[in-house]
Image (cartoon, rainbow, N blue to C red):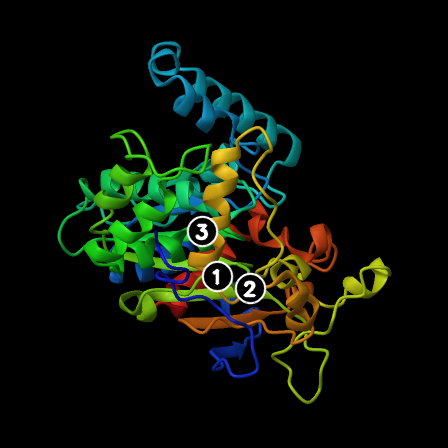
Amino acid sequence: MLRKKTLSFPHHTLSGKEASGIAKIQPPQIYQEVGKSPHEVVSRLQQRNISKLLYIHGTFAGNDLTGIARNLSRISPLLTRRLQLDRTLKEWSKRGVDTISGSQGNFPEAYITQVNQFLRAGHSNPQTAPIQASRFAWSGENHHLGRLHGALSLHQTLTELNRDLQADQRVLIFAHSHGGNLLALLTLLNHSNSQIKRKLIRHLSVSSTGTQEQPTSSDLATLINSCTELPNIDIVTLGTPLRYRWSPSQQRRLIHVINHRAVIEQDPHRTAFPNLFNPLDLSGLGDIIQQLGIGGSDFPPTILTPSERKQEKKLSKILESSVRRKDYFKKLNLGRRESCDGESILLDYRDIEPTEAPKLFGHAVYTLDRLIPFHLALASVELG
């Protein structure tokens, strides 16, 4: 019988004792000027050996919001593989999300096309290949288990990208919302030794009846054990809530961008407690979803998958052992914006997009297609 708390991953506690991170308030005009020249942006990225771009969406913009496709693979792997049921469901689901939301808190194919057009416009060296952008889709579920599956699938995608990279080339990743927490979790898994991975697998190897069972080759065990090496990556998160910490090896190549409006004179880095009963008050605070998405805001997996609900319960103790739902509003009241890891850049998007910045509670502005040059310029300037 495993003891409680035998395994715990580092996470943001959002307590008064937690050390502050590095944060700075930047005027957006710095990046606007650089972004006017595709040649300058692409040149800066190439000087940093960036050869691939990858865009990761956040929660509710995914391809399996209920986990149905994943559970079809688990219940009947042979039939699902032959008929490609999970793949078909994911494609339909993602196509529907892209049609409804467009680039509002999402990275549709049209967005990636525009990124590649900008990169080609700035490419001037015929001796080198232009930087190529693509996107990564995951379920978009709002719980630990969905993010764990997403992180492990992301590792497979990065492994495939790494095959096309030379030794000094890098991948630049833009991750919106909880897409950033996929990456945080992935860096922690990659940084974990084999003993920690074995413990994690034992914790998650629980059947629907609550008894221990041997993991099969098709479940999480194989994916967790294979998570051993990442390509050279630079990361820009966009409105990512403070949840999991990041591995020490990623600190120098990690930037968090947050839509923020300074409203507390004593501490301009903090945000005010959101008055959810007055939407007009929310428009002046910046990204409310980044603030609300802290520990305690997850949804449970569907009641149709009791084994996953048990796994989720165990994961919550492993990944966020300090989180108690009754402390949610207390932690929310701290108004914490910056991560403990990397550097957080606080931008008032109303200075450049006054009508779009408040939409989706300030959380959708990051993925506007007309801000593609702006965010590429930001990455080219801030990544050391």
Name the residue nearer the viewer: 125 or 303: 303
Q: What's under tag 2, amino acid-wise?
A: Val
The residue positioned 37% from the left and 60% from the top of the image is: 40
Residue of label 2? 323
Answer above or below: position of 322 versus 225: below
Does residue 338 appear to the left or right of 163 in the view shown? right
Question: Is any part of residue 331 visible from this angle?
Answer: yes
Name the residue nearer the viewer: 320 or 307: 307
The picture places residue 137, in percent across and down from the top left corner, at: 45, 36
The residue positioned 42% from the left and 50% from the top of the image is: 182
- Inter-mark Cα distance, 2 to 3: 12 Å
Q: Are marks 2 and 1 in contact (CB under 8 Å)?
A: yes
Does residue 47 appear to the left or right of 37 in the view shown? left
Q: Are marks 3 and 1 in contact (CB under 8 Å)?
A: no
The picture places residue 134, in percent across and down from the top left corner, at: 38, 39
Q: Please tell me how crowded label 3 is: few (under 14), some (14-19), or many (20+) other residues with Cα within 10 Å.
A: many
Q: Please tell me how crowded label 1 is: few (under 14), some (14-19), or many (20+) other residues with Cα within 10 Å.
A: many
Residue of label 1? 320
Q: Quadrant of residue 66?
A: top right
Does residue 48 appear to the left or right of 312 in the view shown? left
The picture places residue 43, in percent across and down from the top left corner, at: 31, 58
Q: What's under tag 3, amino acid-wise?
A: Leu
- Inter-mark Cα distance, 3 to 1: 8 Å
In what element is the residue under mark 1?
loop
Q: Quadrant of residue 272?
A: bottom right
Does residue 195 appear to the left or right of 284 in the view shown? left
Quadrant containing the C terminus in the rendered view: bottom left
Of the residues under marks 2 and 3, which one precedes in the sequence? Answer: 3
Q: What's under tag 1, amino acid-wise?
A: Glu
Residue of label 3? 315
